[in-house]
Image: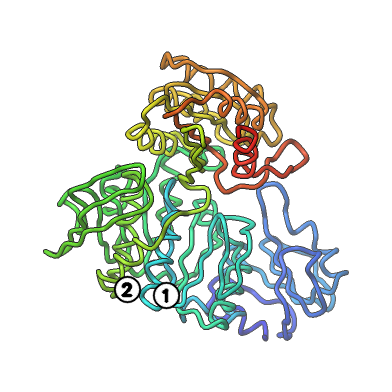
Amino acid sequence: MKISDLVKNMEEVEVIGNDIDIKKLCYSTSDIDENSLFFCIVGLNVDGHTFIKKAIENGAKAIVVSKDLEPLNDVTVIKVKDTREAMSLISSNFYGNPSKEIDVIGITGTNGKTTSTFMMKSILEVANKKTSLLGTIYNIIGSKKEEAKRTTPESKDLQGLFRDMINFGDDSCIMEVSSHSLDLKRVYGVDFKVGIFTNLTQDHLDFHSDMGSYFNAKMKLFDNSEYAVINIDDEYGRKAVNKIKGKVLTYGLTNEANLFASDILISSEGAKFKLNYKGESEEILLHLPGKFNIYNALGCIGAALILNITLEDIKKGLESLSSVPGRSEKITSSKGFTVIIDYAHTPDGLTNILSTTKEYTDGNLIALFGCGGDRDRTKRPLMGKAAGEIADFCVVTSDNPRGEEPSDIIQDIIPGVKATGCNYTVIENRKDAIKYAIDNAKKGDVIVIAGKGHETYQILKNETIHFDEKEIVLDFLKEEL
């Protein structure tokens, strides 16, 4: 594609050099072939402008920059204000603006994004929509499923995936949209049919300076969404309704919302509620427990209604979803206790899973959790407090310590647990902690292993090891027999 076509409809762009034909887009020098265009992305730790010489040596014929350069021989320079923004727009043009050809449903919020994508996909498929999914666990396009490398792909990769979806014959895409991706403009220029806002609680303050910045990042999704579906029971959801200029449908648990749930019954097997919308009602049975999953379902119902999907198909879609990997996954021991594996890694997420589990726990509720390293330290005591206020016993352990010492992270958690008066123990090695909890569990007890959910690895300083909690639990339960 000619450079003039790649920069079509872009503002504040200057092309210095020939209008050459580009065969490939790259933001890593290792991907460059002949006739490639290289984006000099200014990252958090690395500036892509420092790799210009390497990019040219590898065959790049065009360079996208945001800084002044000395003239480059035989290389076209595309000068822009923001190389991330330019990568999104150029990539969209390169792949033929694919998000205009499919219904893209984006879900943002602190908790509930992954479960909501699975709910939404189930609804769309019952309605005979050919649907792709992009999220934290998997990317599913057509018949192809692979583990996701990040919650929201980089813009160049994302636009390529949209084109793959269309080539596979898909007409819909449901995707998680992280606050990082919004701030880093990975979804800049994507045409979203519907944006869903689940909730906002403390997380990622290592990246966003404060909750206001975190909220503002989330709101960027709705700048490019034709419709917005907003949880107005959430404090920030109510703020969002006042900020969004487009069409808004609200949901919640009271009739203040356009779409609301009533007659709620929650058990260990799931959640039952009555859906109410424009004078119509429908009984819905979820196989996923907890009030928080009712909220997830309501957001998806709102999006489905906007897409003109019938209540009958919505009901079938939600009721056909039996589980989501690493989200409230239940394993029952022959000794009569239960293990729940869940991704909860925020204070609010931990409160949600523990309070739901507490309702059907006959014995003691044991919370096993840690906190990630090189992330927001201020939420660590809050995690301890959330667990201690609900659980009968806490096992404080390691999570993904990354570059920090696990013991230092644990020491940040402990004051929160102590403040509640809850009994606890510290076992730094996570596998040993799981074994301890299982060895000491009695009939009627429930162990909630929180923080990693679907992840099959643990990040320890400079190495990543295989660590699949479901495998580990099943192995320990076999030893119990």
Looking at the rendered structure, the kind of residue marked 2 is: Leu
Relative height, residue 411 to residue 297 (above, below): above
**Mark 2, residue position:** 307
Q: Secondary structure at mark 1?
A: strand
Q: How many marks?
A: 2
- The disc placed on residue 103 is 1
In the depicted view, which residue is nearer to us: 150 or 100?
150
Residues 366 and 445: in front is: 445
Kindly check if marks 2 and 1 are in contact, taking CB atoms under 8 A apart as contact. yes
N-terminal of the pair, mark 2 or mark 1, is 1
SS of the residue at dot 2? loop
In this picture, is 59 found above or below 233?
Answer: below
Residue at 72 percent across and 36 percent down: it is 460
Quadrant housing residue 168: bottom right
- CA–CA distance in space, label 2 to label 1: 9 Å
Task: Residue lying at the far left in this picture: please name it.
Answer: 279
Bin the neighbour count of mark 2 within 10 Å (Cα to Cα): few under 14, some 14-19, many 20 and up: some
Dot label at residue 407? none
**Residue 252: % across, % down:** 24, 50
Tell me the quadrant of the picture where the N terminus can be found: bottom right
**Residue at x-position 66% and y-position 22%:** 407
Type of residue at label 1? Asp
Q: Residue 339, percent across and down?
A: 50, 37
Q: Residue at x 29, y 63 (%)?
A: 302
Q: Residue at x 75, y 59 (%)?
A: 49
Q: Residue 15: which quarter of the image? A: bottom right
Q: Nearer the viewer, residue 455 or 6?
A: 455
Image quarter of the C terminus: top right
Where is residue 335 shown, x and y percent of the image? 50, 32
Residue 403 screen position, x and y as percent: 71, 34
